[in-house]
Amino acid sequence: MKNLAIARRYAKALLMIGKEDGRAESYKDELDGVTRLIQSNRELEQAITNPLHDATARKKVLNAVVEKLELSRVMKSFITLLFDKGRIGFLDGINAFYQELADELKGVARATIVSATELSEEAVEKIRQGLSRRTGKEVILDVKQDPGLIGGIVTRIGDLVLDGSVKTQLLNMRDSLKKGERA
């Protein structure tokens, strides 16, 4: 829980800077790029985050990466601050929170749809439009499949879960029948 609070705090701080200077969206892209680069290269991640390596050497590696990426002054300072405060290991969580906060600032909501079978492009677009109307935001969908649902779909948008799966309906029916037997 503490890790989430730390990640959220740093993400909010960067977003405040982005709001002030009007570059929240470019910081979103830069932070995501740095995070993906470090995540995709295990040796680089170890060279920067592993406390068994000398801190000075780790910082040199980080500075070299930051210089190669040609990041903005603010992003360079932010990444360096994370390292200096011993928070560079939280980069993935910070990035995830920042992506959410920046999307929220822009009026974008992310949703996940899980269906038992593959949905047509038309069906996905209709669902996206319906969610956009319901939330009043532009919706970006992540579509997944889970044959275990039997049929129907489960939609998650923020904390809201709309479960229209056959599996859940059958489980609810079973519970209702069990309650009826006890009465």
Image (cartoon, rainbow, N blue to C red):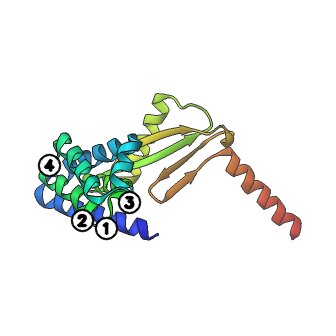
SS type, badge 1: helix
Taking the spot 17% from the left edge, 61% from the top edge, the residue there is 17
Toward the viewer: 58 or 139?
58
The x, y position of residue 76, in whole percent, is 18, 53
Pointer 2 with pointer 1, Cβ within 8 A: yes
Q: Does 19 sit left or right of 3 as displayed? A: left
Is 75 situated above or below 42? below
Q: Which residue is mark 3?
A: 51
| Distance of label 4 from label 1 (alpha carbons) | 21 Å
Is 113 situated above or below 74? above
N-terminal-most mark, 1 or 3: 1
N-terminal-most mark, 4 or 1: 1
From where the camera sits, is residue 140 visible? no
Quadrant, the C terminus: bottom right
| Distance of label 2 from label 4 (alpha carbons) | 16 Å
**Callout 4 environment at 10 Å: few (<14), some (14 to 19), or many (20+)?**
some
Which circle marks residue 13 in the picture?
Answer: 2
Residue type of the residue flagged with mark 1: Arg
Q: Which residue is mark 4?
A: 72
Residue type of the residue flagged with mark 2: Ala
| Distance of label 4 from label 3 (alpha carbons) | 27 Å
Q: Does 74 sit left or right of 105 as displayed? A: left
Which circle marks residue 132 in the picture?
Answer: none
From where the camera sits, is residue 60 visible? yes
- Given this view, does label 4 or label 3 mark the residue nearer the observer? 3
Q: Which residue is mark 1?
A: 9
SS type, badge 2: helix
Taking the spot 53% from the left edge, 38% from the top edge, the residue there is 144
N-terminal-most mark, 2 or 4: 2
Toward the viewer: 154 or 144?
144
